[in-house]
Amino acid sequence: MGKKVTYLGLDIGNYDVKTVNTSTPSGFNVFTTKPYGVSEYLLYNGKYYTPSMDRFAYRKDKTKNENAFIMSLFGISKELIVRAQKKYDRELKRAEETSSYLPSVDSIQDVLNEAYSLNLGVGVPPTHYATLAQKTIDYYKEHFSEPVVCEFNGYRIEINLNYCQCYPQDIAAVCGYAPKKRENSVINFDSYYAIDIGGWTIDVITFIKDTLDNLKCDSKTIGVLPMYESIIKHAEEETGKRITNDIIESILTGKPTLVPEDVKELILNDVKNHVRLILGGLVQFGLSFDLYPTLFIGGGSLLFRKYIDEVKDEFGLIKYEFIENPNANALGYEKLIKKESNN
């Protein structure tokens, strides 16, 4: 019996590593023994890796070191476990509802042990696609040339890569986007902008008559993490307090903190000004928000949503919408690799 094929989209972002169902910070710590009390760990080649909120520095070409490989193991392992959990739950429910039915698996590990081959969809920014797409494919083919075995949170994972393809991010997200009311959606227009606010970069792509206009595509390193660095420096200069990334993120997402109101106000004002910097930079680049509708993509866009709404009139932003799923690129990669493999 041949191996079944599993299709999986993997988005190695500068802020998070994402699959359709999971998200992991794009940073990790390495230990020779399992650290006490960790909620997530990866064991590979005798070393323990744990996710870290201290993300790695921006790297245009992620094939230059092993970080992307380890982060891929996090993403793939977590996604396979989520899917195994769902299958196990379905089997269990069916067995409970049908007394004559015997489950084919006894545990989540049983599901993970089933033989399969992996068709993997990954991506790079559109502006880097020509130079990095094949390098990225070769990187995965080299690192998964033989079955890769690791352990994640106690589960044994064996990854058998069958096929890998690389797609332009953001374009993939648009391809996988299915708005609830398409007739009112930005993607119902022949021409529009798609702006992905990511960890380190802001990527913009422009569709004219449903065709990509390469002259109106750009990538700027003014994403969420550079903003965090700027806010930390400003807050320390003004208040003497050393704020951290996780505190800023908690404030932005409305979670409780002990940060004084005056410091919180400084932080939120800096966030709004950063959104102005992003939109202003795009206008300077040549985008006309008063003529073309805009589709915002990525977790950074959702993080800044309130502030985009507040400053939109300053930049003539008339019609725009957000892809609500922060894992949209991973979903797009998965849909594209499945479509390509079945053709």
Image (cartoon, rainbow, N blue to C red):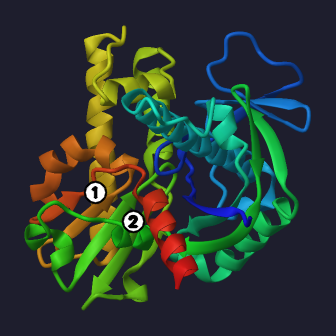
Please give the residue where the numbered disc 2 appears in the rendered image: 173
User: Which disc is residue 265 wearing?
Assistant: none
Amino acid at the residue labelled 1? Ile
Residue 226 location (% of width, % of height): 50, 45
Instruction: Give neighbour class at mark 2: few <14, some 14-19, many 20+ (Cα, 10 Å).
Output: many
- Please indicate whether residue 75 sits to the left or right of residue 157 in the image: left
**What's the residue at 32%, 41% (across, down)?**
303
The first of marks 1 and 2 along the sequence is 2
| Above or below for 53 versus 143 | above
Q: Nearer the viewer, residue 215 or 64?
A: 64
Callout 1 secondary element: loop
Please give the residue where the numbered disc 1 appears in the rendered image: 323
Q: Nearer the viewer, residue 319 or 182?
A: 182
Assess whether mark 2 and mark 1 are in contact (beta carbons under 8 angstroms).
Answer: yes
**What's the residue at 34%, 70% (across, down)?**
174
Instruction: Give neighbour class at mark 1: few <14, some 14-19, many 20+ (Cα, 10 Å).
Output: many
**Residue 56 visible, this orientation:** no
Q: Which part of the image, by quadrant, shows the N terminus?
A: bottom right
